[in-house]
Image (cartoon, grey):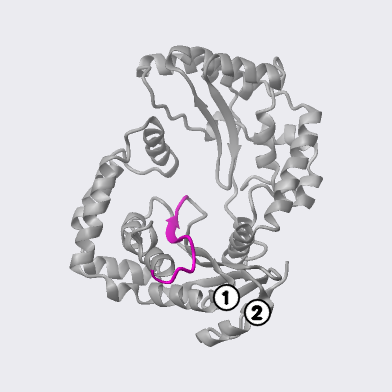
């Protein structure tokens, strides 16, 4: 998305989707059949900060699968009928998301955190208007300018040894022409005021979607993994305080969670839940109280429990090929050390209560967060004034 030109948000996303629609030598049906016979899957994706070609299949067919992936990458079909169909499918998704409280809350939070005009406030698939503005010639030009080995990494996990794995990729390395691609830094917008409730009206909604969020640190920041440890007992799963209080004790929701989402540019701490509409005010107060008072709850006993749980989960975190590939992608994308997982284990073992409290104060400060509520404004907006955060700001959409 960082490469999308002004007025054509979704161009990178749409280009990647179209790359899956056959090749110059194969129709979409022929491509699907060829991959099916090999027990393989090759898919192109594009998100906020990167484009990806995901290749998986039976090891015995490795060379044939790589050859098809190469054909898809270097000889795209760019079929006009597929282009129109995909544009309509994306616009359908956009319409569906405009009626989905979780999607509305997530998109609203992004606009508030990064500013309405900020690059990172946009969704990677664009808007209905920007998708309509994209032409097939735009797709071809984007592909020609930006699909380049100069900005690519290849990560591999599986049973073929390194010699065999690399040999099959030699032809691709020789044929894939490199171009100079400059990925622009995100343009910053004017962020919304923190410590404020922003309300999106969803008339007669039986439930309210609640998000508390703030910008955070990138994946390779020294504070990132300590922050993951700090968040563990707050909201990383069913053992978290948010889940325990909001679901098990109060019965407001099916689940409540918090986490750090880290990449290079788009880095966010977010706590969220969908609750019964009638308990919106108390649910927001519970989020506020638990996050705001979390630092005081950390003690040696709690930390020992967190360490034990995290070390056990680390043991089984890299058992699948997908897990290993994810680790390699982190190393390639974020320039972290090859032994970063071992370093994370060391951090778990050595972190102290005082260090956790410092991380919580620095990166999970309730006063630095925005509150987003999507629900029935007529019945739920006024009671939120009781929380001492001022009058909620109504967001028009």
| SS type, badge 2 | helix
Q: Residue 130's mark?
A: none
Q: Can you say whether 305 is above or below 365 in the image?
A: above
**Where does the C terminus fall, quadrant-wise?**
bottom right
> Relative to 344, is 366 on the left or the right?
right
> Relative to 277, is 92 on the left or the right?
right
Instruction: Tell whether position 373 is magenta.
Output: no
Q: Can you say whether 53 is above or below 264 in the image?
A: above
Quickly name the residue at label 1: 278
Quickly name the residue at label 2: 379
Front residue (pair 119, 58): 58
The span shown in magenta is: 249-263
Marks 1,2: beta carbons within 8 A: yes
Front residue (pair 287, 167): 287
Q: Position of residue 129 (x, y in %)?
A: 79, 52
Which residue: 63% across, 56% down? 119
Q: Can you say whether 189 is above or below 64 in the image?
A: below
Instruction: Tell whether position 250 is magenta.
Output: yes
Asked if residue 188 shows in the view, the reply is: no
Badge 2 crowding class, 10 Å Cα cut-off, few under 14, some 14 to 19, many 20 or more, is some
Quadrant for residue 44, please give it: top right
Front residue (pair 391, 201): 201
Q: Earlier in the sequence, mark 1 or mark 2?
A: 1
Which residue: 40% across, 63% down? 243
Quadrant for residue 113, please give it: bottom right
Which residue: 80% across, 38% down? 135
Q: Position of residue 357 (x, y in %)?
A: 29, 70
């Amino acid at each position: 998305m960082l490469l999308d030109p002004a007025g054509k948000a979704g161009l990178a996303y749409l280009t990647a989707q179209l790359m899956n629609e056959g090749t110059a030598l194969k129709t979409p049906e022929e491509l699907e059949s060829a991959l099916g016979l090999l027990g393989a899957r090759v898919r192109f994706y594009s998100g906020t900060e990167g484009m990806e070609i995901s290749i998986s299949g039976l090891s015995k067919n490795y060379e044939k699968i790589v050859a098809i992936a190469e054909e898809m990458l270097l000889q795209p079909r760019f079929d006009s009928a597929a282009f129109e169909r995909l544009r309509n499918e994306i616009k359908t998704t956009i319409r569906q998301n405009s009626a989905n409280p979780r999607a509305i809350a997530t998109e609203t939070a992004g606009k508030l955190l990064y500013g309405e005009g900020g690059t990172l406030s946009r969704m990677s698939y664009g808007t209905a208007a920007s998708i309509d503005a994209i032409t097939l010639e735009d797709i071809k030009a984007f592909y020609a300018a930006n699909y380049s080995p100069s900005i690519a990494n290849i990560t591999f996990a599986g049973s073929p040894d390194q010699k065999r794995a690399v040999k099959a990729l030699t032809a691709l390395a020789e044929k894939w022409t490199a171009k100079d691609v400059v990925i622009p830094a995100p343009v910053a917008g004017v962020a919304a005021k923190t410590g404020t409730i922003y309300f999106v009206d969803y008339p007669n909604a039986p439930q309210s979607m609640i998000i508390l969020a703030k910008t955070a640190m990138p994946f390779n920041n020294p504070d990132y993994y300590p922050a993951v440890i700090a968040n563990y007992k707050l909201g990383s799963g069913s053992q978290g305080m948010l889940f325990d209080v909001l679901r098990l004790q109060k019965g407001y929701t099916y689940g409540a969670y918090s986490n750090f989402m880290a990449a290079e540019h788009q880095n966010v701490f977010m706590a969220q839940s969908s609750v019964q509409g009638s308990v919106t005010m108390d649910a927001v107060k519970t989020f506020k109280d638990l996050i705001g008072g979390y630092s005081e709850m950390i003690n040696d006993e709690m930390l020992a429990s967190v360490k034990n749980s995290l070390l056990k989960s680390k043991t089984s975190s890299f058992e699948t090929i997908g897990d290993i590939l994810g680790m390699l992608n982190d190393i390639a994308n974020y320039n972290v050390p090859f032994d970063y997982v071992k370093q994370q284990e060391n951090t778990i073992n050595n972190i102290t209560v005082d260090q956790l409290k410092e991380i919580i104060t620095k990166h999970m400060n309730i006063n630095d967060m925005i509150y987003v509520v999507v629900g029935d404004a007529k019945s739920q907006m006024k009671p939120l004034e009781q929380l001492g955060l001022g009058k909620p700001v109504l967001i028009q959409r």
